[in-house]
Amino acid sequence: MNEKIEIVRYLEDNTIGASATAGLERMAEWQLDLLIRLCRVNPDDEASMQRVKRAIAARDAYRAECMQTDRQNESDELNRKYNNLPPDMKKQFIEYVSENRDEFGDIDMNWLVDPLQNPPVEFWTGENGIVMNEIVNRILFGMEEKENREPIDSALRAIFIYRNTKRESICSDLLIETLDSDIKHMIFWKYAKARLLYE
């Protein structure tokens, strides 16, 4: 929404035929889309076309800047969560990433052997970012509310919601109460591997 408001304002200032747009902040998104489409361009007029090209370049630059800021913020939040993982689960997470590092392409993996480093932005927000996000959030789920609950129980019980994605718990409560810890860990990391391979 804010991005489209900026685009309309830019078009008003830099292209011909822009409509009056008082009260942009109160407009619905479809109204902003309509305003953007209403900006007329004369394809036979070089100056007009240059203004449009500058508007498109400004829009793309603004979008890229916003995306980079969002990625950095998401990465910072996930690094905070990663650093809050229980030591045994953090160790297992590192082992899991090490065993599957071929799935991550050319991302910097020095943090796997250097505990002073955090995973880079590309690790948390790249092609496999949603899976890494899910695994870390599942491990942390419910730990603060119920201190006696094992982290692995929380991980198996968690419902993961991210943007328009929802994934239900991995195991039923009955299985979580019945299975021993080793089997529950095996189930969780097998699930993580499957998510990575079939995302």
Image (cartoon, helix red, strand yellow):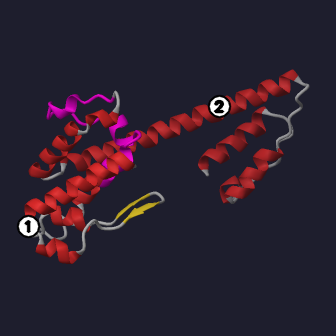
Q: At 20% from the left edge and 65% from the top edge, which residue is drawn?
A: 154
Q: At 13% from the left edge and 53% from the top edge, which residue is drawn?
A: 86
Query: Residue 15: x percent and y percent?
Result: 80, 34
What amino acid is found at the position of numbered circle 2 in the picture? Answer: Ala
What amino acid is found at the position of numbered circle 1 in the picture? Answer: Asp
Taking the view exactly as shown, the residue that stands out farthest to the bottom is 174
* Label 1 SS: loop
Residue contact between numbered discs 1 and 2, judged by CB atoms under 8 Å: no
Query: Residue 106: x percent and y percent?
Result: 34, 27
Q: How many marks?
A: 2
Query: Residue 27: x percent and y percent?
Result: 70, 58
Q: CA distance from mark 1 to mark 2?
A: 57 Å
The answer to whether residue 195 is left or right of residue 140 is right
The quadrant holding residue 55 is top right
The answer to whether residue 113 is left or right of residue 166 is left
Q: At 84% from the left edge and 23% from the top edge, which residue is drawn?
A: 47
* Label 2 SS: helix
Q: Residues within 10 Å of mark 1 (few under 14, many from 20)?
A: few
The answer to whether residue 33 is left or right of residue 198 is right
- In front of the other: label 1 or label 2? 1
Q: At 31% from the left edge and 51% from the top edge, which residue is drawn?
A: 194
Say which residue label 2 marks: 58
Q: Residues within 10 Å of mark 2 (few under 14, many from 20)?
A: some
The one of 129 and 20 positioned closer to us in this rendering = 129
Point out which mark residue 180 bears.
1
Where does the magenta region start and end? 107-134
